[in-house]
Image (cartoon, rainbow, N blue to C red):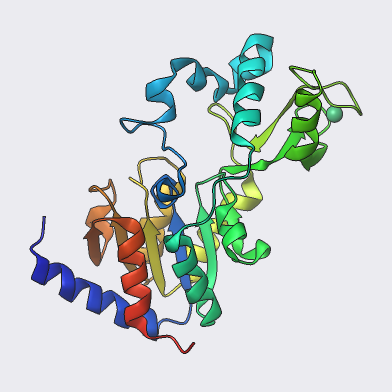
Amino acid sequence: MKNDEDMSSDLTQVSQWLAQAKRVVVFSGAGISTDSGIPDFRGPNGLWTRNPLAEKTSTLSYYLNDPEVRKVAWEGRVRNFNGTAQPNGGHHAIVRIQNAGKLSCVITQNVDGLHQDSGIEEHNVVEVHGTIKYGRCWGCDDRRPMSEFIARVIAGDPDPHCELCGGVVKSDAILFEQALVPDVIDRAFDEAEKCDLLLAVGSTLSVRPANQLVPRAKAAGALVVILNGTSTHMDAFAHVVLEGSITPTLEALVAGAEFPT
Ligand SMILES: [Zn+2]
């Protein structure tokens, strides 16, 4: 850990870079949403720590083959679909980067849709692990808002299937064993290589291939800043590592950049 003085001069440095940057890419992980009440996966209060069955609902083969696993998954979606999770100050700080005309895009490993809810333009959010805001048929690929499926579960169908082809419906988030969408991950790498400042926030950067954005951005000449509550797998590639609370640190970084209001 750095002392307070070093941390403060790092913050000043990164704020200056933000003020000077023309193409910022923010790469976010679960840590940016914990202040919105969304638990991460592997932490002490993480989803999988508390309920091992929940890990099965996140694994494609179990999900496709076991109606009981799907039932548990749908129960969880109904519980979580109450719309109470709101973007926090960290999400809003990123909106200020966008409003200053400096944001190329947000690349996120999160599936919660909170960047869009905070005001990042839809086409500027690259969701490498998909989204829970939509459901998708495994059979015919039909995609529609999750709210439609939630309504069917509440109406008494514990495992709603596709009304077009009868296929299994899952959320449009990428599960374990499921391939990423090539166009989406390609765009993420492309954006990372074109940016002049990559800000990785709230991720331990342990999940491939998304974590490879960090070395790729650096190799292409970008400044790389990592902000997380703990050390990450990619710290060695960063020009500055900020280890601390995510929301207040993001707010301080953006305030320090003194964007015109
Ligand atoms: Zn279908």
Residue 17 appears in the picture as rendered: no
Q: Say which residue appears at 43% left-offset and 85% top-offset.
A: 259
Quarter of the image for residue 214 reads bottom left
**Where is residue 78 shown, x and y percent of the image?**
66, 29
Q: Say which residue appears at 37% left-offset and 23% top-offset.
A: 49
- On screen, residue 61 above or below 114: above
Instruction: Name the side, left or right, on which 67 lies relative to 197.
Output: right
Q: Say which residue appears at 24% left-offset and 78% top-offset.
A: 13
State ligand 1's quadrant. Answer: top right
- On screen, residue 51 above or below 81: above
Residue 56 vs residue 79, the one in the foreground: 79
Outermost residue on the right side: it is: 164
| Quarter of the image where the N terminus is located | bottom left
Residue 101 vs residue 91, the one in the foreground: 91
Instruction: Name the side, left or right, on which 177 lies relative to 155.
Output: left
Residue 113 vs residue 185, the one in the foreground: 113
Q: Say which residue appears at 54% left-offset and 52% top-offset.
A: 86
**Where is residue 174 shown, x and y percent of the image?**
59, 36
Residue 61 vs residue 95, the one in the foreground: 95
- On screen, residue 237 above or below 233: below
